[in-house]
Image (cartoon, rainbow, N blue to C red):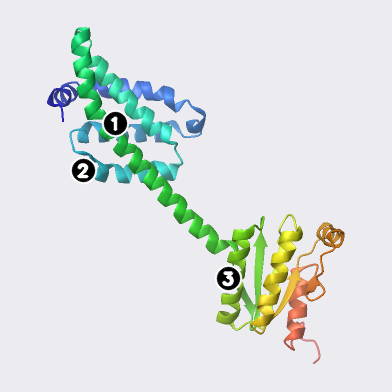
C-alpha cells in the first residue's frame, strides 16, 4: 500500500468527501437511479464514501468484509453496478488529480503507476463483492419463485388444487410434475385439480405437459381434473387437434371442486336443507 496516497487521503478527507458527493449527484441523475429519493441516495452515498475513506488502507481481504453488508444493501435497493464502479472511479480521479495538481509530468507517471497498483485491487474487490452478492440474491429469488411456481394445495380431504399462473416452459413443466407427484403422495389426494385460469396461452407443448402430468397422477392412484378452460383456450385446443379425452375438464374451479366432491362421494349442501 502506497503510504503517500494514504497520507494524502487522510489529510484531505473533508475536501475529497465534498467533491465526491458533488460528483455523485451527476451519477444519481442517471435513469436507473432517478426513482430513488434524494434522502436515501444521499445517505447511501455518504455511507459508501465513508466506507472508502475509513477502510481504503486495508488489504482487499479485510475490505471485503466491510463491503459485504454495503453490497447487500444496494443490491436490495436494486442499484446498478455502475453506481459502485463509477463511484470508485470518481474517488480515484479526485485523489489522483489532487495529488498531481502541482507535480511535473514525469512525477505524474510515477504516481500513476503507484496509484494503479493501489486502486486496481480495491476496484476488483468491490466488483467481486457486488456481483457475488447479486448472484446470491438472484439465486435465492429463483429458488423462492420455483417454490411458488406450482404449489399443490389441499382444499378438502383427498382433494388438492394446483393453480398455475403465467407461461409454462419445459423447466417449469418439470417442476409442476415433481410438485404434483410429491403432493399427491404427501396429502394422500384422490383427486387433483389443475387450474389453468391464469395460463395465458395453451399450445401443443403446454397441452402435452398437462397430459403427461395427468397420466403421472393416474399412475400413483389419483384422478386429474383440468379446470379453468376459457373459450379461447378451448378453441385453440380444438384447432390444434389436441386429444384430452382421458382428462375430465371443467370451465371453472367451482365446477371442478363440485365434480371432485362427487368423485369422492360428497357434495356441497346448504345448511338447513333436508337430507
Q: Secondary structure at mark 2?
A: helix
Q: Total of numbered circles in the picture?
A: 3
Q: Is residue 271 visible?
A: no
The mark nearer the N terminus, 1 or 2, is: 1
**Residue 62: assigned label:** 2
How far separated are the C-alphas under marks 1 and 3? 48 Å
Dot 3 alpha-carbon crowd within 10 angstroms: few under 14, some 14 to 19, many 20 or more: some
Circle 3 is placed at which residue position? 178
Mark 1 to mark 2: distance in Å?
A: 17 Å
Q: In this image, 60 relative to 195: left or right?
A: left
Judge by depth and name the residue closer to the eye, 268 or 153.
153
Q: Is residue 181 left or right of residue 275?
A: left
> Residue 218 lies in what quarter of the image?
bottom right
Mark 1 falls on what kind of element? Answer: helix
Would you say 200 lies left or right of 113 here?
Answer: right
Residue 19, relative to residue 77: is it above or below? above
How would you rate the neighbour count of disc 1 (Cα within 10 Å): few for under 14, some for 14-19, many for 20 or more?
A: some
Q: Give the number of the mark in front: 3 or 2.
A: 3
User: Residue 229: x percent and y percent?
Assistant: 79, 64
Horizontal and vertical percent position of residue 55: 21, 36
From mark 3 to mark 2, how far is it between C-alphas? 44 Å
Q: Quadrant of the C terminus?
A: bottom right
| Tag 3 and tag 2, C-beta contact below 8 Å | no
Mark 3 and mark 2 lie on one chain; the one further toward the N terminus is 2
Q: On residue 49, which mark appears?
A: 1
Q: Nearer the viewer, residue 70 or 146?
A: 146
Q: Do residues under tags 1 and 2 come within 8 Å of each other at their CB atoms?
A: no
Q: Position of residue 21 (x, y in %)?
A: 34, 24
| Label 2 environment density (alpha carbons within 10 Å; few <14, some 14–19, many ≥20) | few
Q: Quadrant of residue 75?
A: top left
In the picture shown, does residue 252 fall above or below 156?
above
* Image quarter of the N terminus: top left
Amino acid at each position: 500500500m502506497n503510504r503517500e496516497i494514504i497520507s494524502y487521503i487522510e489529510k484531505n478527507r473533508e475536501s475529497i468527501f465534498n467533491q465526491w458527493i458533488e460528483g455523485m449527484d451527476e451519477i444519481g441523475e442517471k435513469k436507473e437511479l432517478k426513482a430513488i429519493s434524494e434522502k436515501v441516495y444521499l445517505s447511501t452515498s455518504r455511507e459508501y464514501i465513508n466506507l472508502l475513506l475509513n477502510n481504503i488502507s486495508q488489504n482487499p481481504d479485510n475490505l471485503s468484509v466491510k463491503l459485504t453488508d454495503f453490497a447487500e444493501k444496494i443490491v436490495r435497493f436494486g442499484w446498478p453496478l455502475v453506481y459502485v464502479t463509477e463511484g470508485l472511479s470518481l474517488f480515484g480521479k479526485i485523489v489522483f488529480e489532487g495529488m498531481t495538481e502541482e507535480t511535473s509530468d514525469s512525477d505524474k507517471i510515477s504516481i500513476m503507476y503507484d496509484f494503479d497498483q493501489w486502486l486496481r485491487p480495491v476496484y476488483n474487490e468491490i466488483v467481486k463483492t457486488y456481483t457475488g452478492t447479486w448472484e446470491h440474491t438472484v439465486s435465492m429469488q429463483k429458488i423462492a419463485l420455483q417454490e411458488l411456481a406450482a404449489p399443490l394445495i389441499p382444499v378438502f380431504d383427498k382433494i388438492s388444487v394446483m393453480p398455475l399462473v403465467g407461461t409454462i416452459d419445459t423447466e417449469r413443466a418439470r417442476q409442476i410434475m415433481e410438485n404434483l407427484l410429491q403432493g399427491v403422495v404427501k396429502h394422500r389426494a384422490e383427486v387433483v385439480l389443475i387450474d389453468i385460469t391464469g395460463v395465458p396461452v395453451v399450445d401443443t407443448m403446454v397441452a402435452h405437459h398437462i397430459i403427461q402430468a395427468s397420466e403421472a397422477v393416474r399412475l400413483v392412484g389419483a384422478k386429474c381434473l383440468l379446470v379453468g378452460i376459457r373459450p379461447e383456450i378451448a378453441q385453440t385446443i380444438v384447432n390444434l387437434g389436441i386429444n384430452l379425452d382421458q382428462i375430465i375438464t371443467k370451465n371453472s374451479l367451482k365446477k371442478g371442486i363440485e365434480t371432485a366432491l362427487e368423485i369422492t362421494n360428497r357434495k356441497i349442501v346448504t345448511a338447513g336443507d333436508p337430507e
